[in-house]
Amino acid sequence: MASGKKQRVLQSKQPRKIVRIGLIVTGLLTALAVIAEQLASHWPFEFSPKVLMDEIDQRSLLAGKLVQGEKKDGLDGKIKQQHPRIFLPFLAGWDPATGTHPTLKTRLATFKKRKVSSVNPCVYPNVMARAACWILTPTKENGDLMVKRMFDFYLKSPAESGYYGNAWQLAFAYDLGSLYPGFSAKQRQEIQSRLKRELKKYIRLLEGDDLSLWHGRASMAANAFLIAVILDTDLDDHKELLQQSQRHFLDVMAALELTEGWPEGFSYWINNRALVLALAAGAYLNGLSDTKEADRIKEIMRRTGHWHIYATRPDHRVEHVGDEGARVDLKDITRPYIDFVAQMTEDPFLTAYSQYLLQAFGGSSYHDSYRWAFRLFNEPKLLTRFVESPSLKHVGQGLPRFDIFGKGAFNLGYIRSDWTNNATYISFRAGHNFTHHGHYDAGHFTLFKGEPLAVNSSSYTLFDKPNRLNYALRTVAKNSLLILRPGEHVQPNKLFKEDIAAGGQRLTMPTGSAVRNIKHWYQNLYQGAHWEGGVILQQDSQVDFDYVLMDLTAAYNNTHFDDNGEQGKVWRVTRELLYLRPQDRLLVHDFIHAVKPNYRKKWLLHTLVKPEVNSVKVIKGQKNDGIMLSDDNRVLVKGKTAQLTVDRIFPIDAKTEVIGGPHYRFYADTDGDGATYDGKNQAEGASSKPWFDQAQWRLGFVSSGQQNVDQFLVSLTPRLKQKQHDYPALKSLLAVGQQARAVLSGDRAVVFVAHEMADVLAVKKTGQAKQLLIVGLAMAQSVDIQIGSEKVTVMANSAGVVKTKLPHSSDKILIFFNKK
């Protein structure tokens, strides 16, 4: 992995287009200045006012957080004089001579009553376990051994890249151990001096420019603040160190508030960031008094905790995002973190989720190195709903079945038909770029029912090998869209040995990042390094459907910014996901306006098994290991327990492409033409580890390459094997009057409105329709719907959606768009 300095060198070699911006206010000193600057350079001025205002609204909501990137005078709050300052605040003022604190006695009694097995922390030798041992059994022997372990503890200092130090463990033990009367003033001073030396090392690194915010900077800032809070205030220069560490920690909290999930991937989060960030947040809430940010910190931690719930698939694994690793299996580390955050926030959903993890993984829900913490982290009195099987059914009661995390920035969303293990589970992303471990996946979605049916085909093991650089982190490995421009140059830096034009989105920071703070990130949105990607323009969730409209234009080389220094390859790219809940069907509508008609568009879907399609012609390789084409518009993905029916409704003249097998599963185009199939299988460095969805095949719908504008409308209908014949009617409808697309699904006519809206739209062949759903309208758009001689006026809701029952059947529906 590249160091911070190398990262900046690598990034500086990426081609950039210099843009003159007339409205930049020097230094971006206020949130208004930032918004003004971004609007001055923002590319979609030619789009409709609705689209522009939606994006302005998204970013203006976030602008208030930019102040976290500026130095502040003074400290938010005051250090509490008593310990502990990280958690268990009820211990303040406790007299250890009276024995175990009554609250902890009650907790242990509750565990016993509920027959909850747990390990006595006294059996572990590490310094944090010895502190927990003394807290639960406050004898002199345990106290003296705890102090000895503090002095025996070997401090490992943080490094600029790759190692974040271990001082937080000593700080944790010291905070609890400070309650021990046998811990002398001289001993305390010596431990604090050691911690203070480490704190200065953290501050020195944090004040530099090499650490990246959604990476090592987060861990460093959490370590620094945790140490600073537990130090006594009478130490020399402590106030300055505390203020510095708090400023950096607040910036990390602002970053977490922006994304509400972790762009590097769940494994990086849970292995390297989650627990120390939670402990530091606990120190903010319990170690400081009179703070302005306490409620905000608690809400950030609650919201991030909920991300874990939503990211959990029905097969008890986390859906992948970014460079992933083994801990997507949710074992070992997730439950200790969830227990701590549940106790901090008193959130009943997180408490129930902890029980779910126990049911799913038993003893493996706590790694042996953390089992000492269970009796302190897990608060049984918060448990109000008992989870007695490995299912989220009782966890999710009361939670929405549709949610988006990091709305306006990360835009990581989840849709569920319900919270059972047989649920249809959909994830999607349409956000910006944050870190070098993130992927270029705007518009990507996955679908699970009984088993993974539409999957993320990326794996991760070797950072700089061809599989990651030329395939896994790119759009070609996702269920998104390729727009192939012949001769497009995609070789961001010297780690990329080949120029691979696979047709995907811009690679903005694939091998290194050094995002200093939120302000710095915003300074490179729609300008500078151009870290922008997708945005969500509309979203709606009702009893019978979930809907999201994404604009993906900025993720690709476009007419307002092209890292090749040309005129872009797209004018506009949007994707709409519409999940029809009663029919258990996902409709995906894509609008692609390419700069030139010969820029082929490809709609991608990755699968574990070979998609079944009729009348295939082998183009390269052979039938079970190669590239095939077909004119058929229906594809079946048959798993062991479930089946996915994929129907291409539009374009009618598209080809169906099937690629996979041992020598083609990582195939990527190299020259950007998309037609000659002279690409390469990027297998070197791929991982076969079981925690990845090992996609063997991919399905593609390929445009004819004869027009600038193409629209894909695809239906995905998942079914468990025993219900595979339950298939609601599906047929295309003829939409006359503009470039809209319409489909009849069951008894519902669905109309996806085109961007160039005409005065009137006629939808024909609608005789079976009893309901009408129109999506993609402007907020509060008024439309007249005429069936025969009957006309009714309806208004779109805030998400631009009209839903209405039809008074009677008719072969034609007229829709009039009122200009007012």
Image: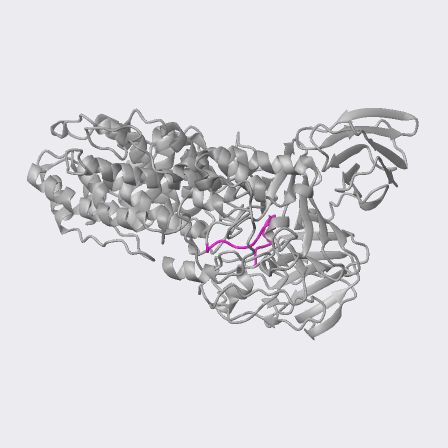
Question: Image check: 348 left or right of 617?
Answer: left
User: From the image, which quarter does the C terminus lie in?
Assistant: top right
Is residue 673 depicted above or below 758 in this figure? Answer: below
Report whether residue 388 is seen.
Answer: no
The residue positioned farthest toward the bottom in the image shown: 621
User: Along the line of sight, which residue is nearer the eye, 451 or 499?
Assistant: 499
Give the residue at x 43% y 56%: 326
Give the residue at x 11% y 40%: 189
**Residue 240 image position (x, y, % from top left):** 23, 37
Q: Main secondary structure of the magenta part?
A: loop
**Residue 650 image position (x, y, % from top left):** 78, 51
Give residue 675's quadrant in the image: bottom right
Start-end of magenta stretch: 436-457
Determine if the magenta segment contains residue 453: yes
The residue positioned farthest toward the right in the image shown: 789
Question: Image check: 606 left or right of 148?
Answer: right
Give residue 742's quadrant in the image: top right
Give the residue at x 72% y 37%: 775
**Residue 319 image position (x, y, % from top left):** 52, 49
User: Along the line of sight, which residue is nearer the eye, 696 or 27?
Assistant: 27
**Residue 357 image position (x, y, % from top left):** 42, 43
